[in-house]
Amino acid sequence: MKRLAILGSTGSIGQSTLSIVEQFPNRYSVAALAAGRNLEEAFAQTLRWRPRIVSLATEELAGQLAARLKTAGLPEIEVVHGSAGTVACSTHPEADFVVSAIVGVAGLEATHAAILAGKPIGLANKECMVAAGEILTAAARERNVPILPIDSEHNAVHQCMRVGQHGEVKTIWLTASGGPFRHLPLNEFASITPEQALKHPTWVMGRRITIDSATMLNKGLEIIEACRLFNVPPSQVRVTVHPQSTVHSLVEFVDGSILAQISVTDMRLPILYALAYPERPASTLTFDLAALRHLDFEQPDFERFPCLRLAYEAAEMGGNHPIALNAADEVAVEAFLERRIPFTGIPSTIERVLASTPEGHPATIAEVLAADRQARQSAHALLS
Ligand SMILES: NC(=O)c1ccc[n+]([C@@H]2O[C@H](COP(=O)([O-])OP(=O)(O)OC[C@H]3O[C@@H](n4cnc5c(N)ncnc54)[C@H](OP(=O)(O)O)[C@@H]3O)[C@@H](O)[C@H]2O)c1
């Protein structure tokens, strides 16, 4: 029985993880749940899963949850809050696997602490790998802690890599659906509304990642995530637009062979893979190969999606630049959703923040968080 700490339990990945636990009660149980502000869902999950410890974003919300649990006859469940609370969940002695699925750098400290505590990680939270990938992977290597990607593309790459050696890899090909604006004329980009951008053609996900998919910054973050997870330079990671989202990614080997991973478009499959690795439990997540008519692959359009270029530039520079890329995007996406800037304001904000980012290579999580705060301040200053 693997006992899970689920960080971001109330989100899209968190809920999919719990549905895997539901399907495999003999394999998985829940030791810790960390959520943000969704008190109702956190309460319902706590009643259902009876973890040892639950965390919410603020002291006030944690107080309300503790009172409701007491009334419900569950006063023994520990309720904590804030970043110290998520760390208490990710390092809880009864947790033996951590699903890192908080959105943004809010999940960084808890993910790092879990690695230091020797807990295997199922990683959905790509932003923490973008901001602090070198620190996280070095800590994991030192302690022999596996980081198993949940992001479907990296999960696919992980699967393809199992048949070859690291030195035999020529190119990692990340597939991208291309988002909802693949064919929209460029002169209409400025008038894209949040409602249009929140409609992803193939995946149902949280708000930030959905907007990031529409700008293709999400693919940019994934390029950096792939460099960190698989220890390759940005020149070895390429993007191909594949609108069907059927091939989740590919690995090209030096002998000319290309391996692809195909499966249903459902995040429960990469989650199950990460939880069960190196085993493959039988599941109901089947893919109907007979229904497959064609697979399209296209070059990404760097003019339409400048976020891709910005991500490659930040990946090449390393250090403060990927941190600033992620932080500026988070601030800009929020401003776009609040209708304070147009869709095209997202890449232009990121570009201006990157241009003013000083060179530097943070060596600790505290330094990463300081660089993140600095970039956020620059983005806010630009947008105010
Ligand atoms: N969804 C997907 O299909 C998908 C695919 C690949 C990778 N990912 C990655 O997985 C991560 C989660 O994505 P998602 O789509 O599941 O996002 P989501 O639905 O927006 O969920 C985000 C989760 O993070 C929690 N959270 C936010 N701020 C927090 C804080 N300060 N402290 C503690 N918890 C906090 C939220 O809690 P409340 O809701 O309670 O506030 C929620 O549980 C992201 O890094 C994303 O890029 C997602």
Image (cartoon, rainbow, N blue to C red):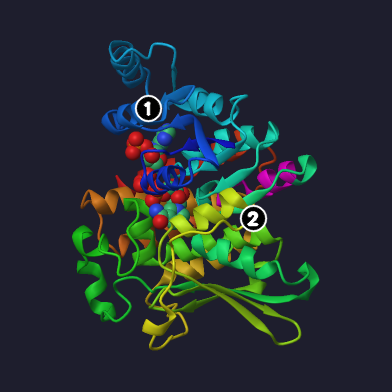
Q: Amino acid at mark 2?
A: Glu
Q: Earlier in the sequence, mark 1 or mark 2?
A: 1
What numbered label is drawn on residue 279? 2
Q: Amino acid at mark 1?
A: Thr
Please identify the dominant SS of the magenta region: helix
Q: What is the crowding at mark 1: few (fewer than 14 residues within 10 Å), some, or many (at least 20)? A: many
Camera-side residue: 85 or 159? Answer: 159
Image coords of residue 76 (percent x, y): 44, 12
Q: Secondary structure at mark 1?
A: helix
The part of the chain drawn in magenta is 129-140
Position of 369 relative to 341 (above/below)? above
Q: What is the crowding at mark 2: few (fewer than 14 residues within 10 Å), some, or many (at least 20)? A: few
Q: Is residue 218 visible?
A: yes
Figure quadrant of residue 346: bottom left
Q: Which residue is mark 1?
A: 46
Residue that appears at 51% across and 35% down: 29
Q: Secondary structure at mark 2?
A: loop
- Is 133 contained in the magenta span? yes
Image coords of residue 317 (percent x, y): 63, 60
Q: Is residue 328 visible?
A: no
